[in-house]
Amino acid sequence: MKNRSGLLLICLGLAACQGSNPYVGSSRPLPPAPPQAASTFDRSAYPAPPRDYGRYRSWSWLNGRLPPGTAWADSAQVAEAVSSALDQRGLRPLHDNRAADLFVSADLRLETRMRQVRDDYGYGGGYGGYGGYNRYGSGYGMYNTVPIVRTYQEQVVVVRVDLFDAQSGQPVWSSSAETSNRGSQGAQTDAIREAVEKAMSAYPPS
């Protein structure tokens, strides 16, 4: 009896497997591409080509404005230092109505920096036999250092130079540098030139 019941269950299972599947696959067609897809170029799908800095040969001030002056240095000092640094890199200023290759802006400001200096001060000590300074007999000595860290404030000159593509208006290069602040008028001019030269030292980028 048990064998017949088991055989009946197997037959029913096979009959169920041969029945129709209630789940039927279906798909929808893809929507048509927009009309502008054939003529649209997706720039994000391709890496940007390397910038050719060699094609930049001329420049003018951004919006026709010289760098702003400060209480420490006037506008002409900053403009002269930037113009000289650009000239050393083959960039010539335009003073007429021709279109320049680059627009240039510059900014100068004074900032305060916190500096730390470590000084090592030594002290020695010794003792010996009779006479104290090892005149007679054996003696012993030692020498140690005690580090002292001093913190002080220093005022520095910070110069920032920005270059923009004159056709697209996009920024193409930017840098800033600083140098120590000096007192006299002649030393101030040297400090500005030094800071500008440091900022422009990496142009054109390799």
Image (cartoon, helix red, strand yellow):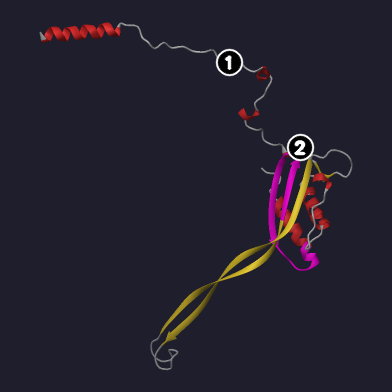
Q: What is the quadrant of the C terminus in the image?
A: top right
Judging by the rendered image, the residue that carries numbered circle 2 is 55
Which amino acid, mark 1?
Answer: Pro
Q: Which residues are magenta?
A: 159-188
Q: Earlier in the sequence, mark 2 or mark 1?
A: 1
Which amino acid, mark 2?
Answer: Arg
The number of numbered discs placed on residues in the rendered structure image is 2
**Which residue corresponds to the image point at 78% horizontal and 68% vertical from the top-left?**
184
Q: What is the quadrant of the N terminus in the image?
A: top left
- Is residue 18 on the magenta stretch? no
Judging by the rendered image, the residue that carries numbered circle 1 is 31
Apparent side of residue 137 relative to residue 160 in the rendered image (left or right): left
Question: What secondary structure is marked by label 1?
Answer: loop
The x, y position of residue 80, in whole percent, is 82, 54
CA gap, disc 2 and disc 1: 45 Å
Q: Quadrant of residue 149?
A: bottom right
Indicate which disc residue 134 carries. Answer: none
